[in-house]
Each structure stands twice: as C-alpha cells, then as structure tokens.
Image (cartoon, rainbow, N blue to C red):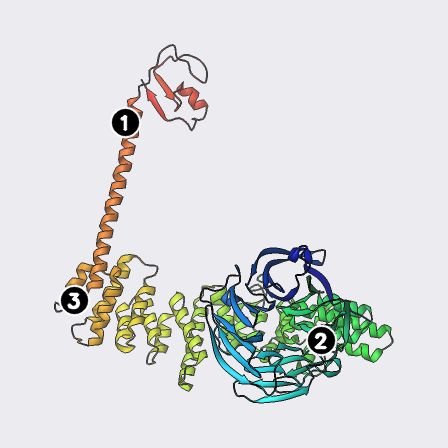
Amino acid sequence: MSLKAFELVPAVEREMLMGDKARINVECIECCGKNLYIGTNDCFVYHFLLEEKISAEKVTFAATKQLHKYLGFKKAVSELKAASALNRLLVLCDNTITLVNMMNLEPIPTGARIKGAVTFTVNENPMSGDPFCVEVCIISVKRRTIQMFMVYEDRVQIVKEVSTPEQPCAVAVDGHYLCLALTTQYIILNYNTGISQDLFPYCSDEKRPIVKRIGRQEFLLAGPGGLGMFATVDGISQRAPVHWSENVIGAALCFPYVVALDDEFITVHSMLDQLLKQTLSFKEGHILQDFEGKVFVATNKGVYILVPLPLERQIQDLLSSHRVEEALILAKAARRNIPKEKFQVMYKRILQQAGFIHFAQLQFLEAKELFRYFALGLLHHYNGQDAAALQLWVKIVNGDIQDSTRSDLYEYIVDFLTFCSDQELVWKYAEWVLQKSEEVGVQIFTKRPLEEQGKNSFNPDNVMNCLNKYPKSLVKYLEYLVLDKKIKKEKYHTHLAVLYLETVLKLKSVTTDNCVELTETQTKLRSLLQKSDFYRIHFILDKIKGTDLHMERAILYGKLEEHDKALHILVHESKDFSAAEDYCIWSSESKDLPYRQRLFHMLLSVYLNPGSSDCELVMAAVDLLNNHAAEFDAARVLQLVPDSWSVQLLSPFLTGAMRESIHAKRMTQITLGLAKAENLIYKHDKVKLKGSPVILSDKKLCQVCQSPFCEPAFVRYPNGGMVHTHCAANRLMNPNMTHHSQT
C-alpha cells in the first residue's frame, strides 16, 4: 500500500527556459537558497529566482528568470556547483571548471580555472576550516588520477593528487575520505594517508554507478542486483539496503527517505525500515539531486521539485491505514525535524491512537505496550488526584516502573509542581526534585506564578530554609531574588555575595589551572559587588582581607569612597594598571566630571608618589595621561609632573588637553553668542509690540457686544480687534489675547 510522502511540483517549465527552441536540453542544475541555475547543451547557464508559495496546504513555486549567459564553448555545460560564501558558481564545460560570479554570471577577472576535469564534487565536510575557501575534488583527464583543489574567491590551488587502482568514474567526498566508483568496484580512499578499502564489486560498463554522500562519514551507492547500499568510511553498512530497480539513474536524500530515479518512475524508500513508500510516474527523467533539503528532478526540457508532505500528515495517513508499526517508526524519526515540545505532544497522541488501533483489533498485549503509566497519571490529574499522578510519575523516573512515553518526565514533574496550587504537595516533593538536579529542581520556586510568591508558604525565607542543604539551588534562588526580581534587601544581597566568595576561595584552594567555573563565579562576584548597593560592605571586606582577591577589595573600598586605598591595592599589590584605569571609569560612571577628574588625579598621584622611583609606575603615569587627556585638569597636571619630563613624552596629553581647552572655549563662545542673539530677538519683539500705536475712537465697536467704548480701558487681540475688558472677562480670558492696555 502506497504512502503519499511527496508531491511533484513544476519549478521551471519548457517555455520559460527555451521558448520554441526544440534542440535545447537541460544538462545539469544547481540550487542555492532561492537561486536556481540550469546548464544546457548549447553552453548557456540560466539563472532563476525561485519563490515558494503556500496556499490551502498546497505548495507551488514561481520561477523568475534573471539572466542567461553564453560561456563561449561548443560543448554542453556538464556540472554546476554553487559556493555561496565566495559568491561563485563553479561551471564544468569542455573539461574545464570556470569560476563565475553567482549574480551576473561573469567569469572572475583573474581568469582562475581548473583544467583537465572529467567530473567534480565539492567537499561538504571540509578539512581546511577556512570559511572563504571551497574544497573541490576532480576526476582528472589523466588516467587513474584524483586531484584535490582549494578554490578561493579569485584563485585555485592544487593540494593533492592521488592515484587510483582503476579508472574512477564517480566520486563523493567527506572530510579526508573519498568514496569512488572504479571500473569494477567501489572503494573508500583516505586521500590524506593513501589507505584504501574495498567495498563491493560493481561493473560500471553495464550500469551507471551512483555515489552519494548522505551524511557525516556515510555514503549511498548503487549496488549489484538493484540494491541501494549504505556504507561508512570504515567500510561497513549500518543500515539494511533498499531495493531499487535495475536501471536506476540517480538518487537523493530527504530524511527519512531515499528517492531514486529510473527511466519511468521515481521511487521513495524509507531509510528507517527500507520499505517502498511511494511510486510516482515520471518519464524521460535524467537528473535527480537534493539541495539544502529540496529534491529536484529534471527531464531534458523542464525542472520539477518533490515537495515533502508534513510528517504529521504522513503519520496520520499510516495510522488511518492501520499501518501502526510504520507510523511509530516514522514518528520516532520525526524528533529531529520537529521542536521538542511539539514533538512530545504529537508523539503522545500518536501512541494513544496506535494503542486504540491495536485494541480495536483485539491485540491487547500490543495495546498495553502503547498505553499504562504516564497517561494513567494524566488521568489522575484530570480527575483532581494530583497526589496519585505524582506518585506514579516519580516511580517512573526512579525506575520502579517502566514507561518510555516521555524521556523528559523529570522536567515535566518540575514544571507540574511549579504550577501546582497544592502547597503541601509541592513541599512534599521539593526534596526529591532537588536531589535529582539542583539546577533544574529549584525552578519549582523560581518559576512559580508571581501572585503566589510571598503570599503563602513559598515566601523567600521558607524557600531558603529548604535550600540550605543544596548550595547550587540556593545560589540560583538568590540570583533570582537579587538579579531577576531586583529585591532590595540587604540579607539577600549579602548572602549571595558570601556564597560567591566562598565558592571562589574554595576553587582557588583546589585548582591552579584556568578553571571555567572559577572565572565565571569570580566575574559574578565582581559584578554584584560593583552594581549592588545593598550588601554589608564591611562584613564582606573582613572576609576578603588576607586573600589575593585584589580587585574585589578595591571594589569594596571604592564603595566606601576610600578610593586611595582601592587604587593603592590595584597599583602596588595587584600591579594591574589597566584595572586601575577601569576602576576610575566605572567608579565615576554616574558621577559628574569633577568627581571623575578627582579619581584620575588620585591615580596619577599614586603613580607619581615622591617616594617611588619605579620606572614601571612612571611609564604607567605617562600612558594614563596620554590615553585619558580629557579626564585631567591640564593646569594641575603640569604642576604634578616632574620637570625632567620632555614635551615630546607628553605630546599626546598636551595635544588632547589643548584641543579640549580650545573646544570648551569655542563652545562657550557659541553658547554666549546664541544667548545674545536670542536676547536681541526678544528685544526686537518687545520694541515691535510697543511701537505699534492703538487708536481708540467713538467710532470703534467692541467685537463681542458691538457697543462703543465709554471708557479708555480695552483689550486688544493679535488680529487687531478690540473688546471691552468685561467682555473679555466674560469670555473667560480668550487665550489668543496678547496684552491688556489702557489709553
């Protein structure tokens, strides 16, 4: 019984490619992203853009022709390979591989090319590690010779030439391994060591060999008797063969299916159970290739795409046909293509369906294997029996009973407890989840809904009492309170700082190498000490005294505004001048310029201590001035530096200081000039307002009441209209009024 795994959809049809030119044939294709390239028998390369369109669960493709290019030979274009990182298309024609631009199809200016190639392939698992280089393997026109090239954006370089026992006719590459179809057999050849391994015989004179890389260190080969054989680089087969027709032309991979093409059909076999799943009629096909998960098939006149149906739909089709085992095999394989959470929901539903199918067929043992304990726990939960559900699930995790429905059942239980409203039940299993994993188990407290926290038994003090036996969980919970929830309580901040500090001191006592955990914890400690203002500074300082945590001590003294002590530690004890400069920067981040200058002057004074003649400190002082000229008062600096220092030594500082001074002066002048101009504008407006006389006569009427003015008081609007003062007041003082005047 057939399964519909793929639909055949046209991509580029005859009219788009060749119009009414009957003699033009498709020789090769290449697809890279949305770019489709077609090579023809008359030495043209065509470039199309493919747009995928989905409507009502039906997929179609719209191809838009970009351009086509004649390559200048009288031979067909044999092969095309795209190197998107280089923006290059490798074109094999007349035994020569030419590099052309992927967009305009123009040959590269340097003219670099590979000559003498019968066929070629690109190493999809390259060994060079250079992202802007492509490794290419060619079968050379020289007899029994394979050559390896490095192809760059504008040049090619041969790196290896290997002799083969017989004439090679097809090749696939993975890393250092070549899978070769020779005249009478397939072999694996390590081109780096020269060691080869025979696979199985095959007569290339009678049938067309197929060598296809399908994954890391694994190949698919057309074997004798119409078998599709799988082989690793070690010369073994980890999968059973698939049964093809005797005259298979090409093969492609679209997990979990192997697709094969012969002169009449496209066949689809599963890699999981090797069964034939689908057969599509397709005549005159001569190309079958997969590119980035898409399977293309072509005749001489057109190009088509095999569009896979969603795996969920395929699984449902199998279940509808009561093909339970095939459905379960396909469902397990779908794990690599479907997000974890979605897969778990889907797989649970499939198991239930499969179980009921067996049950309906009176296959009770098989049905029992697919039902029993996780689902039973869900049934308890839906009936309000959470305690019974948890008891069952905990037994599964502990291994007391067997149920492989959910491989992540422990995480599921943690999530279940996180949203469980039964407080007693959560506390009952808190110890169990923490013992299984401190990092994951603590989520029953850190991921609880906000409305529950602090209003019941899950308040921080109760939680911390529970976590005292679990240091990793305690740190995670305190990080949640301090860093995520930003609770400003001294005891939480101090407690977290102490735990960080104890971990750092413990790791320092047992390791001398660069320890990742030590580095991460020390970074967290420094960040907390720098950013928090709620821990007990003197308490932490007492714990740090006598240790080599110089930066931490400096941070604490900085919090106490004892910057001289902090800088003395960094300069004289730690001798970390870069850290001393960083200290001045972060300590004054939210402060004004005078505060920042005070810190930098203080550091300069430490460097230029009269009692010190250390050349290293002198050079540090010079670097400080030259690198941070804007942070200093130049006049004060010139009083501090020794008279013996040359102008050339401080030229960067002096240049920066002069620029800063001149800039400040000019900005002040601009500000003053703008202020004067603004003042002048206001004066001008005032003069204009005073300079326009307002003449009141008995002929003028109030704009509001239309009565003449009986007294000299009036209100004038910006449009020149005049009203009685009491009329203006009755109008609630119209906001457009500009001034109140009396004659």
Which mark, residue 687?
1
Residue 254 % position (x, y): 67, 71
Name the amino acid, label 2. Thr
Local secondary structure at mark 2: loop
Q: Check whether the beta carbons of the residues at disc 2 and disc 1 lie within 8 A of each other.
A: no
Residue 123, can we see it? no
Q: Which of 717 and 66 is in front in this view?
A: 66
Amino acid type at image mark 3:
Val
- The answer to whether residue 617 is above or below residue 238 is above
The tag on residue 405 is 2
Give 737 or 271, whichever is nearer the viewer: 271
Q: Is residue 618 visible?
A: yes
Q: How crowded is mark 3: few (under 14 residues within 10 Å), some or many (20 or more)?
A: some
Q: Is residue 124 left or right of residue 577?
A: right
Q: Earlier in the sequence, mark 2 or mark 1?
A: 2
Query: Which circle's residue, 2 or 3, is located before the other in the chain?
Result: 2
Pick whichever, 737 or 453, lies toward us: 737
Structural crowding at the residue carrying mark 2, measured as other residues with C-alpha within 10 Å and reported as few (<14), some (14–19) or many (≥20): some
Q: In this view, does 300 lie above or below 140?
A: above
Give residue 76's position: percent from left, percent from top: 61, 67
Q: Pointer 1: residues within 10 angstroms few (<14), some, or many (20+)?
A: few
Question: Which amino acid, mark 1?
Answer: Val
**Disc 2 and disc 1: Cα gap in Å?**
90 Å
Q: Position of residue 560 (x, y in %)?
A: 32, 67
Q: Position of residue 235 (x, y in %)?
A: 63, 87
